[in-house]
Image: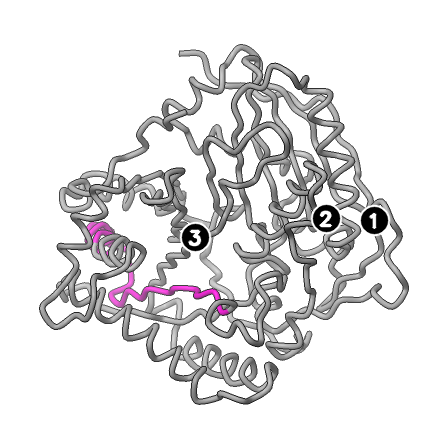
Amino acid sequence: METMKVETIAKEIIKPSSTTPNDLQTLQLSIYDHILPPVYTVAFLFYTKDDLISPEQSSHKLKTSLAETLTKFYPLAGRIKGVTIDCNDEGAVFVDARVNNYPLSDFLRSPDFKTLQQLLPLDVIDDPYEAATTWPLLLVKATYFPCGGMAIGLCITHKIADATSISTFIQSWAAMARGEAGDIVADPVFAAANFYPPANELFKFPVDENANKISQITKRFVFSASKLEELRTKAASEDFVGRPKRVESVTALLWKAFVAAASSNTNACDMKVLIQPSNLRPKIPSLLAESLIGNIMFSSVVLGISQQEEIKIEKAVRDLRKQGDDLQNVIKEEGGSSSAMIGSKLANLMLTNYSKLSYETHEPYTVSSWCKLPLYEASFGWGSPVWIAGNVAPMLENVTMLIDSKDGQGIEAFVTLPEENMLSLEQNTELLAFASVNPSVLV
């Protein structure tokens, strides 16, 4: 079969439609923003044919609504300067591209992750790692298929955007394109450093010197609604109160499969640890608005195991639930405290936990859930997306993203592992009893 080729037609800098006021020119990053690796949070949105709208009309609508949206999301048009963002209206990058002789339906029949990278706008800059720390904070690529379908590839620096932040931005931009922005979307709040302590340039987080030296590969595993129900039944135990949640069950199964896949890798560390970022906004709704932009997460080691130990899914689910309850109890203990006091306590707890880890002795795996984010509601005026994918770019080792299937019931897991481990994972019979490897996207 012919391979898909993406050709860039034009590249443009989109500036906010209104100048950012002087009193909003500098945005302080939080300590959590600061310690994150220099990568982009990435979302892909796919749309099928709309006979009434040409690519030129679509592109014009996307660019004009983006300029208007950047007036509210003004830091995204700025540039990182140390531990602050210079909100200088320098602008976001917008790329127009087209696919030759390859219908969207063919691509969605078996979405290939290497090909998927062509739908990101990162090919217009020299060094994505450098770009994620210094230049530009937001990049967009609109790619048009010959059948009339289109893909929007979106990159926002992780230094200012977690998954909820990118979802809030997409909802606002889509509403602006439909002419409904004032009605349904809350204005973004840029105050992450009022919760977590402000970043300090003198603070440096240990970096894994061997990161990205091993060839990584990303694969998609899809858990249908019916298989998820089976998995939740299997993951339940007699002393567990209530049924395990979808994300708990999938995370526990994947964790068991990751450890098994690493057992064949002779270079692997003996101690494996699972890290799970947790969105704090719904946990402290009285203090943290859903529209708060930044990295408003609590991230810590939720599970750990040596290579010799056996993982039981039921126990892993219980331990995941306990970690969630412990976090909620820490928050509850601080009831009545200010946002900054709770943030400071959680930041200290996170940094204390991470200080116990070493890249020489611990092998971290991260499972991040994007479930329940309303990404499938992102209509720019030509219907809802038929498929959503998410990740970070450049890819990070051993990182998995969980995203709702279009029906809102299933879960798609985008798993990044070393190639050797991935070969083993794809043959894991227990995992394959509940998940399909890269099935066709139903349009």
Q: Which badge, 1 or 2, comes first in the chain's sequence?
A: 1
Number of other residues with Cα within 10 Å of mark 2, as a class: few under 14, some 14 to 19, many 20 or more: many
**Do tag 1 and tag 2 residues touch (Cβ < 8 Å)?**
yes
Q: Quadrant of the N terminus?
A: top left
On residue 372, the disc is: 3
Does 241 sit left or right of 269 as displayed?
Answer: left
- CA distance separating discs 3 and 1: 33 Å
- CA distance separating discs 3 and 2: 28 Å
**Do tag 3 and tag 1 residues touch (Cβ < 8 Å)?**
no
The residue located at (46%, 77%) in the rendering is: 350
Describe the colour scheme in one phrase. Answer: one colour
Point out the frontmost of discs 3 and 1: 3
The magenta region covers 257-280
Viewer-side residue, 394 vs 214 = 394
Label 1 sits on a secondary structure element that is loop
Query: Please, what is the three-letter code of the amino acid marked with disc 2?
Result: Pro
How many marks can you see?
3
Viewer-side residue, 246 vs 139 = 246
Q: Which residue is mark 1?
A: 90
Point out the frontmost of discs 3 and 2: 3
Q: Position of residue 297 (x, y in %)?
A: 50, 67
Q: Can residue 401 be found in the magenta stretch?
A: no
Q: Position of residue 431 (x, y in %)?
A: 19, 45
Which quadrant holds residue 362? Answer: bottom left
The residue located at (56%, 50%) in the rendering is: 167
Q: Which residue is mark 2?
A: 136
